[in-house]
Image (cartoon, rainbow, N blue to C red):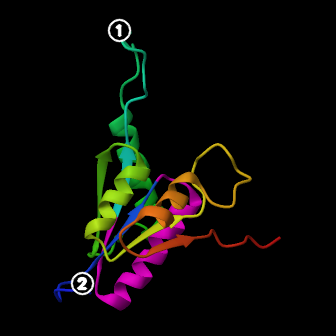
């Protein structure tokens, strides 16, 4: 619950990775206990190009991110998405977007590792940035260990 007594908001960064899907599930478990809403957010942007060059055939980024978000929410909750879960797309980089979203949130929940390129790191760049710079508590969720 927020400081003014209204239901709080838990923001979850979603990129389609297993840790981000588990972050959605964990955020929902917390939201039920706290009477909060869950805001699942996926970020997208155009790739950087050299000034003066026109990038041909690089479209559909927003649509692709929307599909990743939709599939992730379905993987987390099935077809019966809880009423307190909303999802939306934002243009921009997830680091800056989640840090900005943290200003109006009770908590930010992220997966330990997303789809970044350095699998050996203990935490991804987005989760590390959120821990360091968010304006609210940050929960970093690990993917459950798979049975051998």
Nearer the observer, 63 or 118: 118
Look at the image and tell me in which quarter the N terminus lies: bottom left
Tag 1 residue:
52
Tell me where residue 61 appears, x and y as whole percent: 38, 34
Nearer the observer, 134 or 79: 134
| Left or right: where 85 falls relative to 134 | left
Relative to residue 75, is residue 80 depicted above or below? below
Residue extending farthest to the front is 132
Tag 2 residue:
2
The rendered magenta stretch, by its main secondary structure, is classed as helix
Relative to residue 26, is residue 130 depicted above or below? above
The CA distance from mark 2 to mark 1 is: 47 Å
Total marks placed: 2
Residue drawn at 69 percent across, 61 percent down: 122
Q: Which residues are magenta?
A: 15-39
Disc 1 element: loop
Tag on residue 121? none
Q: Residues within 10 Å of mark 2 (few under 14, many from 20)?
A: some
| Left or right: where 19 falls relative to 79 | right
Tell me where residue 143 appears, x and y as whole percent: 63, 68
| Left or right: where 111 falls relative to 36 | right
Tell me where residue 62 appears, x and y as whole percent: 33, 38
Residue drawn at 56 percent across, 71 percent down: 141
Look at the image and tell me in which quarter the C terminus lies: bottom right
Report which quarter residue 5 is drawn in. bottom left
Residue drawn at 36 percent across, 25 percent down: 59
State which tag comes first along the sequence, 2 or 1: 2
Disc 2 element: loop
Report which quarter residue 31 is drawn in. bottom left
């Amino acid at each position: 619950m927020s400081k003014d007594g209204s239901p709080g908001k838990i923001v979850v960064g979603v990129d389609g990775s297993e840790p981000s899907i588990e972050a959605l599930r964990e955020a929902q478990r917390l939201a039920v206990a706290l009477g909060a809403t869950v805001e699942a957010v996926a970020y997208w942007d155009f790739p950087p190009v050299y000034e003066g060059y026109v990038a041909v055939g690089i479209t559909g980024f927003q649509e692709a991110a929307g599909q990743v978000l939709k599939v992730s929410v379905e993987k987390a909750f099935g077809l019966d998405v809880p009423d307190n879960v909303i999802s939306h797309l934002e243009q921009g980089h997830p680091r800056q977007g989640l840090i900005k979203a943290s200003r109006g949130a009770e908590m930010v929940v992220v997966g330990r590792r997303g789809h970044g390129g350095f699998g050996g790191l203990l935490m991804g760049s987005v989760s590390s940035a959120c821990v360091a710079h968010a304006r609210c508590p940050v929960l970093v969720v690990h993917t459950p260990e798979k049975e051998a």
